[in-house]
Amino acid sequence: AVARRFPVLHAQDCISARAAARVRDAGFGSTVVRTVHHVDDFDTEKLMDCQRQAILEPDHVLVVSRMWQQILAADYGIQAELAGNGVATERFAAADPGLVRRLREQVAPAGPLILSVGGIEPRKGTDTLVRALARLRQATPPQAPPPNLAVIGGHSFQDHRWYRDKVLAGLPGLGLAAGPGRDVVELGTVPDEQIPAWYRAADVLAFPSTKEGFGLAPLEAMAAGTPVIVSDLPVFA
């Protein structure tokens, strides 16, 4: 009944894309549009095949950067259309100063605040980030307040607990500790209306991803006037 009401079905992940294709193939006449943000490195052949079919089966494919437009053409023979990302700059430039102050006091009342968006997972390069934090702390004069790292996010349809546990277990060896009021603070999922204030509360956004479709968080931080440090990926250029 739902498929009959909507002639276009749009999906942003492999599971919903394949489900939409099954609806179309059942004779509902729907057109399936898929946005491919990036291609994941799954660890099973079944998931890799699912992802591949979810790129090949839709009627139209969109990507968010020219790099992935080139990758899909080379690896899948798909001529994807570019639909670039953007942000409402006025939203991120208008954070409430009082909220900004309160959020910062939660995690870094004195020292510099480094913000990470996306949770602790392999693709976000969190292991690289905590090593950089350790080096930064070692270079901080004893009389100066040390930097802190706040991590927003963490929900994913993939299970990254093994990686999170590994990163957190390695903190003591780097001279770091995790938890409220410590060097690394996991904030988890925060209310959407607080996101602009978190960007403004931070001294810098650190985004050392190993793979991204585009990287929306750096664009949001820039709109908030927050400096950004990113890894050397073509999409960030």
Image: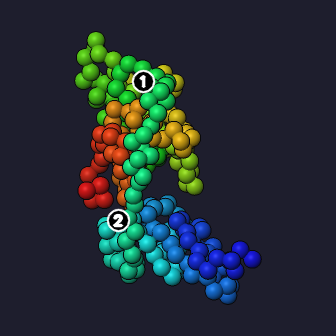
Does label 2 or label 1 sit earlier along the sequence?
2
Q: Is residue 167 visible?
A: no
Q: Quadrant of residue 225?
A: top left
| Residue at 53% from the left image edge and 42% from the top image edge | 193
Q: Which mark is residue 65?
A: 2
- Front-lying residue, 222 or 155: 222
Q: CA distance from mark 2 to mark 1?
A: 35 Å
Position of residue 119 in the picture relative to residue 9 (left or right): left
Work out which residue is located at the far top of the displayed protein and give it.
143
| Label 2 Cα neighbours within 10 Å, binned few <14 / some 14-19 / many ≥20 | many
The amino acid pointed to by label 2 is Ser
Q: Which mark is residue 46?
A: none
Residue 32, how many percent across, how many down?
Answer: 55, 78
Residue 117, how many percent across, how many down?
Answer: 44, 43
Q: Which mark is residue 108?
A: 1
Placement of 33 over or under 99, stated as above or below? below
Q: In the rendered view of the protein, which quadrant contains the N terminus? A: bottom right
The amino acid pointed to by label 1 is Ala
Residue 26, how many percent across, how many down?
Answer: 68, 85
